[in-house]
Structures are given as structure tokens and as C-alpha cells.
Amino acid sequence: MISRTTAYRATVALIWALALWHSWTSRGLFVDGANFLVHVVRGEQFFDFYDPRRYAMVAGQIPVMIAVTLGNTDVHLLARLLSLGLFGLPTIFYTLALHRAKDDPILLAIVIAAIGLVFMTTSFFIVGEYNTLYAVVMLMGVWLATADRLTISDGLVLALLALFSIRIYETMIYLGPLLCLLILWKVWRAPSRPIVATGLHVLAAGFAIRAMTVAIYSVVHPHQPEHLEEVWLWAINFWQNLQFDLALAATLVVVVWALLKPTDLASNRPYAYGAVFLVLLALSPLLALTDGLVRPLAKSQYVARTVSGLIIATMVVVCVAYRATPAVRLPLFEVLRQPSAAKRLLSYAFVMLLAGVPADLQLTQSWIGYLDAIRTTIQSRSGVIPVEDTPLARPPHSLFVEDWVLTTQSVVMRGKPSNGVIAPRRSYGDAWVPFPPEELPNMGRFYWRD
């Protein structure tokens, strides 16, 4: 069984190694990311077109904007820096949550499980601001759980995090009220209430409610009504994400077992059954050797993002309840307070994290091949290139294709004006694209350099 120190250090090292690798491979260009980069480069300014998500957008673009401001014109480097900002932002918050939880094996296990179950299985679409919000909420939950009394420093941290969460993502519709209730409950149960510390906690609760109202407004007045409808429809299709399914199944086996027979958490039995799904998760990249679509898929990670918010909310409640003072005397918690049971849970959470790495690496390697195919295609031909006439029309590259962004990705990766540009499938018709292939945006002095 793994120790707290080893689990903490290994998890931090792993998530940062992956963040740097994903940045180096320009994974931030997946889908909307390429469109973001074109707008940043053309305007040489932040691209924050959607006010309800402005804070996450701006924060994620800081590295690339620094480079643009300093005069860098290498779009390849800028793509890597955009990716670094997008991956680095949630990784920072998860790292802080890990650090805050490192002295409690149960809290540490929950944070590691959140990374393995939610972040690792939904973050290929890293430009989605939900990645940052869920990390922020997890950090706030752990911070509340580990605070023994009301202090100015804790109140300030919670207030700043809640302020940042006001404009990140729509799931604050329910995460906002949840955080508000947990903060106020913490204030109510505090042994003493110093004026300044209490005021900061109440302010944090107010910011959480403000985040809820912004989220409600963004749903009532969406930027793209048809896109919002698609999100609601996709939400019930979370099962299409194989990585998420297997990690969730491994989690549910232990959770349900713990609720029915909590004393078994002091043994290896529930974890042995749950490990079957972790083995399948670790081996899932082998499905890429087949012709079927039952495999880890980058685009399938969209559909699990909504239900992931509910999972994060549940984890936050468990964190606070577990560390509640006076202790919440659930049989499950009583067992987990035993050192041997806590170590087993921590080890299982860490194995879950490791089991998700092979699929992540396989998808990233496939992404590298996809970008190489785009570069080779647009370098070999000029003018408009139908995607049907390129390797992108065939697996595995076709699994990354989103018609509306093909032209934008081509523009980003052009090394000179004579390079070609890939057009969407003919069946895509006259549907919306940021830039038609015949009307390319002027990228000025910015070009992709290998």
C-alpha cells in the first residue's frame, strides 16, 4: 500500500508531467482551441468573447498573450503556450488541493480520485472551462474540510476562489448554492466567529451565489441557443465516454460496497472487484487496434462533462462531512478513520489515476499523428483541399475531425502563404464555420514553424 507522501508527490509529478507533455504536443488546438488561437494572434489581444466564462478564458490565455506581446510570431510555439495555459490552470488548482489534503489520507484519496475519474477522462477538450471550474470547486471543498476554525487567511482564499468562479462555467447553477451552503454551515458550526474572518467567509458565500446568478443568466440568454440544446442532449450520453465509464464503474463498486458493508473497507475484497474495471481501463488503448468505435475517443469526452460536475459536487460534500466537527458518525467514516482502511482507499485512488494514463497517452499520440497529417497535407498542396481527398478522411485521423474547425486548424498550421487549406466535408454543406476556406483570415507575420 502506498504512503501519503508518496501518493501526494507522485500525483503532483504525474499531472504536471502530463500537462507539460500535452502542451508540447499542442493539444490545446483540439476543436475550439484553434479558433481561440487565430483570434488571439489576429487581434494580438485576449479572446474573451463570452462574458459568463471570461475569467477562465483570460487566465488560460496569459502565457500565449505574454509571448505575443513580446513579439513572438511562431504560431507553433504560441500553440504550445496556449496549451500550457489551458492545461496549467486546472493543474494548478488540483495541485493546491492535493497539497491541502496531503496530511489526511482520505481527503487525499478523494482529490486523486477526482483527477482520475473526472479530469483525466474529460480534459482532452481542455479548452472547455469546466476543467478549471471543477478544479476550483474541489480546492474549495478541501479547503473548507481542513479548516478547523475561521481564520482571515482561509476566508481570503475562499473569497478569491469564489470570486474567480463567478465567470467560469454554467454548472455553477448548482455548484454555487452548494458552496454557499457549505461555507455558511462552516461559519455556523465554528467555535468562534472573529469579525473579519467571518466577514470574508460570508463574502465568499455571496460570491458563490453571484456565480449562480451569472450561470442562470447564461442559460436563459445563451450565446448560441442551438449549442446549449446540444449540451443538454449530450449530457445523457455520458456513457459514450469509455474512459469515464470504466473509471466510474470502478468507483461505484467501492462506493456501493462501502454503503452496504462498510466494514469490508478494512479488507481488500471491494477493491479487488473494482480493480477489474481499472485493468480494463488500463488495457482500453488496445481497442484502437480494432476497426470499431468502442475505444477511448477524444470527442467522446465532451459528453461526460456535465455529469462530472455532479460527481465533483458529491466529492466535495463527502470531504466536508468526513472532516466535520463534531464528527459525522456514519459507519463508513468510522471505518475509514482506521489507518489500514484509509491506506487501502488511498492506494486504490492512486491506481485509478495510473490506470487512466495509457489511454491518455494513446490519444495524445494519435493527436500528434493528426496534426502531422494536416501539416503534410497543406504543405504538399495549395488552394482549397477537400478533406475527402486527404488522410484525415480515414481512421484514425478522422476520429479527431470536427468539420467546422478544419479550416481554422489549417490556417493555424500554415508555414507560408502558398500552403493549402483543408475544407470541411461536402456533406457539411453551408453550416457555420469561423472562416470559409475561400476567405482566409489575415494572420500577418504569424506562421507555424517546425
Image: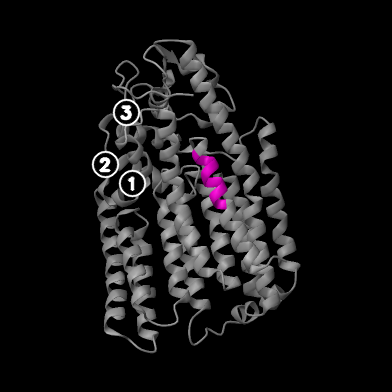
Residue 19: % across, % down: 52, 46
The answer to whether residue 132 is above or below residue 253 is above
Residue at numbered disc 2: 49
Specify how the rendered protein is coloured. one colour
The residues colored magenta run 15-23
Which amino acid does the dot numbered 1 rest on? Met
Give the mark, 2 or 1, whose residue is nearer the N terminus.
2
* Residue 246 higher or lower than 259, as above or below: above
Task: Say whether residue 252 is visible.
Answer: no
Labels 3 & 2 near each other (Cβ < 8 A): no
Q: Report which quarter residue 212 is drawn in.
A: bottom left
- The image quadrant that residue 184 belongs to is bottom left
For the residues bearing labels 2 and 1, Cβ distance under 8 angstroms: yes
Residue occupying the point 69% across, 69% down: 344
User: Which mark, residue 57?
Assistant: 1
Q: Amino acid at mark 2?
A: Phe
Mark 3 vs mark 2, CA separation in Å: 13 Å
